[in-house]
Image (cartoon, helix red, strand yellow):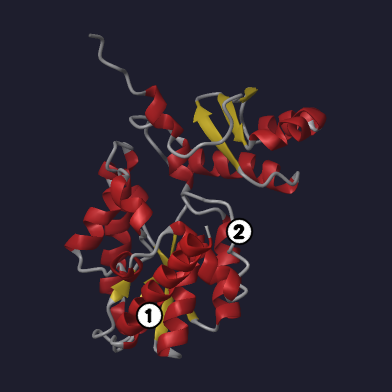
Amino acid sequence: MANVATMAAVDYEVKLARLRERLASLPGAVVAFSGGVDSTMLLAACVEALTDRVVAVTADSPSLPRAELAEASALAREIGARHVVLPTHELEDPDYRKNAGDRCYHCKKELFLTVARRRAEIGPAAWPVLYGAIVDDLGDHRPGQRAAEEHGVLAPLVDAGFSKVDVRRYSRERGLRTADKQSFACLSSRVPHGSPIDSALLLQIERAEGVLRELGFRQFRVRHHGDLARLELSPDEFDAAVARRDALVAGVRAAGYVHVTLDLLGYRQGSWLELRPTSKP
């Protein structure tokens, strides 16, 4: 067992050295920064390698909760990176609003095009745009990766072989408070594919999730089913949900829902995929 642990440590150090070398070779970096675990770790590594030749860029639209935007701004300050908040307009794109399986492609495309249009105020044109994709993402359905490739956006964590375990280790070693942060996705991911999205709907979901956040829940999603809110929580928080049922139901109803249900399967990423019809033999 000790040998396995040693090999894992060596493997991590090799990846880290590879990442440092790659980042140090860049003239500077514009980091697509959501404030999540991966992009925060990437931003910190860029600042470590490039000092003040780094700009963090956050896309601001109705799909991003105000709490997450505030968190991203605070994290950029803590890391010591200049932070630019760019309003993006993906909701003006009918291909985004119709919420098909390639929604994330149109979202990332809008971000990268906005960065290109406003490049003069962000940083030198020679500084490449980086984003926080990791090797764990490579087997998933990630349309945003296609947008990144089309716009020449780099994924240095993938190139260095970083997994989520590696990202969290780096974050813990450097005292980043995102080291144990739960995963987060944009508010549009709460709506089943094929159901159109608009700003009012996203605000409704944001308000409902704000109730869960204020009540102290850690890992949650409010899945939107018309007038029904399906709450996905970590199973170890089910008892808390029952104990706080009255406040939970009142708050989610105040956000605009009529029915409030607790999904007994608990939180899981991509639960909408379970709703895809299966072919019968």
Q: On the rendered structure, is 224 left or right of 270?
A: right
Q: Quadrant of residue 25?
A: bottom left
The residue at the point 27 percent across, 78 percent down is 128
Residue projecting furthest to the top: 281
Q: Is residue 130 above or below residue 185?
A: below
Q: On the rendered structure, is 145 left or right of 171?
A: left
- Which amino acid does the dot numbered 1 rest on? Ala
- Which amino acid does the dot numbered 2 rest on? Asp
The residue at the point 57 percent across, 26 percent down is 265
Q: Residue 38: where, in percent of width, then height?
A: 46, 63
Q: Is residue 105 above or below residue 27?
A: above
Check disc 1 and report its element: helix, strand or loop: helix
What residue is pinned by disc 2? Answer: 180
The residue at the point 59 percent across, 25 percent down is 263
Residue projecting furthest to the left: 150
Query: What's the mark number on residue 136?
Result: none
Q: Residue 31: where, in percent of width, then height?
A: 38, 73
Give the number of the mark in front: 1 or 2: 1
Q: On the rendered structure, is 267 left or right of 195?
A: right
Front residue of 39/227: it is 39
Q: Is residue 57 above or below residue 221?
A: below
Q: Is residue 89 visible?
A: yes
Q: Residue 270: where, in percent of width, then height?
A: 43, 37
Q: Is residue 57 visible?
A: no
- Estimate how packed mark 2 is, as few (under 14), some (14 to 19) or many (20 or more) residues with alpha carbons within 10 Å: few
The residue at the point 33 percent across, 65 percent down is 161
Query: What's the mark number on residue 17?
Result: 1
Check disc 2 and report its element: helix, strand or loop: loop
Q: Is residue 103 above or below residue 31?
A: above
Q: Residue 177: where, in percent of width, then height?
A: 63, 67
